[in-house]
Image (cartoon, coloured by chain):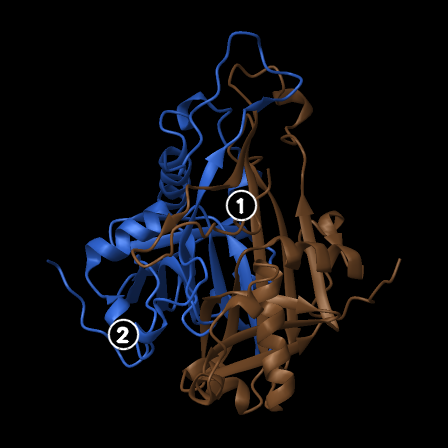
Chain colours: A blue, B brown
Amino acid sequence: MDSKAPTDFTRLRRMHERGHYDRESIHAILDAANHCHVGHIINGRPVVIPTLHWRDGDEVFWHGSSASRMVRANGAGGEACLTATIMDGYVLARSGYNHSINYRSVMCFGTPRLVDDPDEKMAALKTFVERLFPGRWDALRPPNDYEVKATSVLAMKLTEASAKVRNAPPGDNPEDTSWPVWAGVLPVTTLAGAPQPDQFVTPGLIPPPTPQVEV
Amino acid sequence: MDSKAPTDFTRLRRMHERGHYDRESIHAILDAANHCHVGHIINGRPVVIPTLHWRDGDEVFWHGSSASRMVRANGAGGEACLTATIMDGYVLARSGYNHSINYRSVMCFGTPRLVDDPDEKMAALKTFVERLFPGRWDALRPPNDYEVKATSVLAMKLTEASAKVRNAPPGDNPEDTSWPVWAGVLPVTTLAGAPQPDQFVTPGLIPPPTPQVEV
């Protein structure tokens, strides 16, 4: 197991028995999550922005408009915290206090770098598309210079990261287990709906499978 | 329409046509989201923590362990940014650049207050449980003093908030629409799995409906 030592920031204080610091756990949750939330400090205030992310080796990537506040904050060397969470179920206990959720989450701290080498940026964007839709990149109308310039790609090493997982029935106090109320887990998962082709699709073309749907 | 003027922080810069500042839009998305991410500044660094939230009137609430870094940061008067996002689908265009997602998100800025009046705290926790599982609070083993003290409740006025929504087919460039690749929306939604009673449930008790599942 390829483990990372927790830092003062990633060491779990609350429910530390739920913590994982190994690379495999962190990678698996990042890969399974369909989006993430990135926190920045902008003008001294916390700002949390939802976005899609992708992983390549031991780096996590995301992208944004080159003109966005988020990209400018990171381009100026600002720190970020990227958190990806998958909610797996509501955990219903016999006391309010022991209610919980089953979930998998990853929290990554670092100072992202702007991927500004044109070849690396193009390769990163290809990885983003191919991760979601294998084979799609080469089928698309190729990017033009304007599009590549208008898109900024950020990368952050997974050197200060932790995972937190709860996957269990309710943890009721022993004296509560006979309390007459239903207790257990109400699982939730992500379901793919029927693909909705737009009005221009050439008849006969078929949609790719919906990504990150656990069936 | 009960509208809020955007502040310098909530006024949308990117894709501003997707922005909504009216109370109804903000409330509806907060109510539909099954969890949120709260950003804080802790020791000068951004920290983004997933949690469940609930709304009561024009305030958003969340809770945490009284001993957590998050609660201590807020108890010390720190600012927060609460962002809740519902991903509704992958939007596949004919160029990489025009790919997108359909989503509903809300971003709320403010300085949360600790709800420390015992009656108000208890009422807030009841609202939290009842929002998810109507009728459940009175069926539970009542909270004891230790549990109430160990739980902190935070509340933040929705005075500086914005919503952002995309719900549309791909926005391809007109000259791309005949490109021979499938384009459209792959919807995703949250599905409830079969309830998993724990080993102690009295036979005959039935589970409540899974919350926030759109069917």
In the image: residue A35, left or right of residue B25: left
Distance from the alpha carbon under mark 1 to that under mark 2 = 43 Å
Q: Is residue B61 above or below residue A119?
A: below
Circle 1 sits in a helix, a strand or a loop, which is it?
helix
Tell me the amino acid under the disc marked 2.
His
Q: Residues within 10 Å of mark 1 (few under 14, many from 20)?
A: few
The image quarter in which residue B146 lies: bottom left
Residue B64 visible to an observer of this rendering: yes
Residue A159: % across, % down: 26, 66
> Which element type, helix, strand or loop, lies under badge 2?
helix
* Left or right: where B122 falls relative to A60: right
The foreground one among B198 and A132 is B198
Residue beneath disc 2? A16
In this picture, residue B5 sits left or right of residue B180: right
Residue A90 position by quadrant = bottom left
Tag of residue A177: none
**Which label number is shown at residue A149?**
1
Q: Nearer the viewer, residue A34 or A99?
A: A99
Picture layout, residue A97 above or below residue B208: below
Q: Which residue extends farthest left?
A: A1
In the rendered image, the quadrant that contains the N terminus of chain A is bottom left
Disc 1 residue type (three-letter)? Lys
